[in-house]
Image (cartoon, coloured by chain):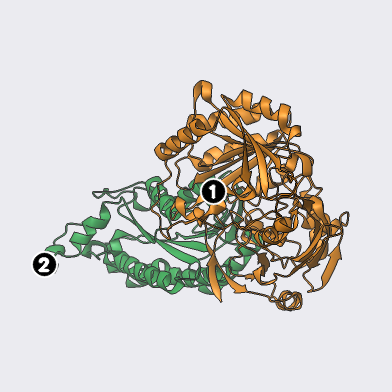
Chain colours: A green, B orange
Amino acid sequence: MKNALGAVDTVLLLGGRSEIGLEIVKLLVGLGASRVVLAVRGEYTPPALGAEVHVLPFDALDVHGHGAVFTKAVELVGDLDVVISAFGVLGSQADYDADPAAAAADVAVNYGAHVSVGLHAARVLREQGHGTLVMLSSVAGARVRKANFVYGSAKAGLDGFAQGLDDALHGSGARVLIVRPGFVIGRMTEGLTPAPLSSTPRQVALATVRALREGASSVWVPRALGPVFGVLRLLPRALWRRMPR
Amino acid sequence: MTTFLTGWGRTAPTPATLARPGSVEHLSELVAAAEGGRGVVARGLGRSYGDAAQNAGGLVLDCTGLDTWTFDEAGGLVTASGGVSLHDLMTALVPRGWFVPVSPGTRHVTVGGAIAADVHGKNHHRDSSFGAHVRSLTLVTADGAARTLRPGDPLFLATVGGMGLTGVIAEATFACVPVETALMRVDVQRTVDLDETLATMAATDDRYRYTVAWIDLLARGSRMGRSVLTRGDHVARAEGKEPPDFTPGAWLRAPARVPGGLLNRLSVRAFNEVWYRKAPRRKTIVQGIAPFFHPLDFVEGWNRVYGSRGFVQYQFVVPFGAEDTLRDIVGSLSAHGTVSFLTVLKRFGPGSGGLLSFPMPGWTLALDIPAGQHGLSGLLRGFDRQVADVGGRVYLAKDSRLRADMMAAMYPELEQWRRIRDEADPAGLFRSDLARRLRL
């Protein structure tokens, strides 16, 4: 249960290798979380987190197996205070142009799988009457750019789904927190030149944990990206399509 | 009906289905029909500060409809349904020359809640806690049966202080104390620092039935721990006087919406200064039962004064001999500048035997702190450890943030309590947010 000061006890991280996801888990453990479930694809040795850690096999594309992951997680740690849906893949637009099948497969991970996970999480959280689902969206979905429109369109879908889900959960005690980072310097973006207003996984995690404690429904990281995209969304298409990246 | 519920501290609301039994039979039916999924817990007047009487996604039984009681004047025994409030009992009994055996800081608690939290009052050093005065109680257990329990029964000991997790307290019989008037003779005394406070309380406690100290937690340096002691006894009747009159009410009502941050370091420091200065160095006064026992009851909904983020209560006890830990904690609070509006210190006597009952012989300190304060979580977690290390504990009826791992360290009889609870409730029907948070 989330306590009076906003600290949580149990966390389920889907995408147990996610740098941002693990940073969020570490911070939550530091603030009092004592039981963690990491849902991960393939063989995995979890890092020492200073809490009770369980590992469950999880394949984003095996949507028929998602329900069982939640059932097992609840068996292991009881009520889920925070569920973080953090898995994802980022391919280059050029590769997607050359291999449409790969593009569709990645969209299935970045969007479709989150829909499945989100709906399972919603069922569990609604039933227990409390808990927050953290969904990692991106500015890439705030306004889709030609430089990465496959990835961006999946994130746009995810963002819309998360907003709708949060509205659907209103009044149930369960909620959704949408995290919208800009360019995150990490494993996923290795070799790419950081964009303006970029952040580190730790900065994203800090903002997420603060938003969780405050009960916010969305957070931009850094905060300035909110107003920046408020303006960018209004740019005429003719200008927007000239964005260099 | 699904309703969001919180405790008196107004933090961490969760939704539950609310049902209001009108009789013990109705209560038994509701419990027997309840589904195991999210469980059931009883709720009274909602004065537990934290999450003891809320049950996310489950069923909460509002027991205030169980409000009948009788009084056996010859034995001084009240037999009351679980939902009867101490306010109703006092209003009827004081004019007849009787008072409840233990009164917490508010009259607005139910008999069921008083037993489930095993509440204490200013007379704990002499009279122990509420559970010590209960002669028998009727508990509706998970199977829907109403069982009569007496002191010494294992399930009785698990129920007194058991936070409603063994069943629903449908009725209880307890002993009242005779009083001749509705007045208190009160010795007020100001102390200059914590050492004088502790020494004076230790030396003079046994001369009074009721004692408590208010501490100015924001005073620093040589004035750290300066206090106002109030110690009193019931006033005996002078010849020929009328029977005692007792018709307390609320004089003020807190506004429905209060902006947060009203109680900050500045305002509380100013209040503390005035409160301390206005107290006489030493004086004996006569005052009514209500202002002596329940000063906050004069302001209806005073919990709203903390704003929308609510507040947390932190009350701990450390055994006698662990005064250094108490000094340490008061020192940290003072150095940290923690804003606690009403900080009270009290000496406890022997406990009631309840397995999860809070009071034990020692010093107890109670704080109430606005929930938004920076660094509060870490500060209190540090105190948890210090308190547990010397064999102390925190009070579950006030708690809203303790971690499960500290629970076993603080309550050594937890395992015994679990065995008795599991026998009475094998499927774990009785559950609350507090039970989940602390993995009881």
Instruction: Quadrant for the C terminus of chain B, please.
Output: bottom right
| Nearer to me, B40 or B109 | B109
Q: Would residue A240 be found to the left or right of residue B302 on screen? A: left
Residue B23 point in image, percent of width and height:
73, 76
In the picture of the structure, the residue carrying the numbered disc 1 is B312
Neighbours of disc 2 within 10 Å: few (<14), some (14-19), many (20+)? few
Residue B104 point in image, percent of width and height:
66, 50
SS assignment at label 1: strand
**Residue type of the residue flagged with mark 2:** Ala
In the picture of the structure, the residue carrying the numbered disc 2 is A238
Residue B60, above or below B417:
below
Residue B241, above or below A174:
above
Residue A6 point in image, percent of width and height:
50, 52
Could one spot residue B229 in this view of the protein?
yes
| Residue furthest to the top | B222
Q: Would residue B170 be found to the left or right of residue A61 on screen? A: right
| Nearer to me, A165 or B135 | B135
Cα distance, mark 1 to mark 2? Answer: 55 Å
Could one spot residue B38 in this view of the protein?
no
Mark 1 and mark 2 residues within 8 Å of each other at the beta carbon = no
Q: Chain of mark 1?
A: B
Residue B175 point in image, percent of width and height:
81, 55
| Residue furthest to the front | B240
Q: How many marks?
A: 2
Residue A150, above or below B230:
below
SS assignment at label 2: helix
Instruction: Quadrant for the N terminus of chain B, please.
Output: bottom right
**Residue type of the residue flagged with mark 1:** Val
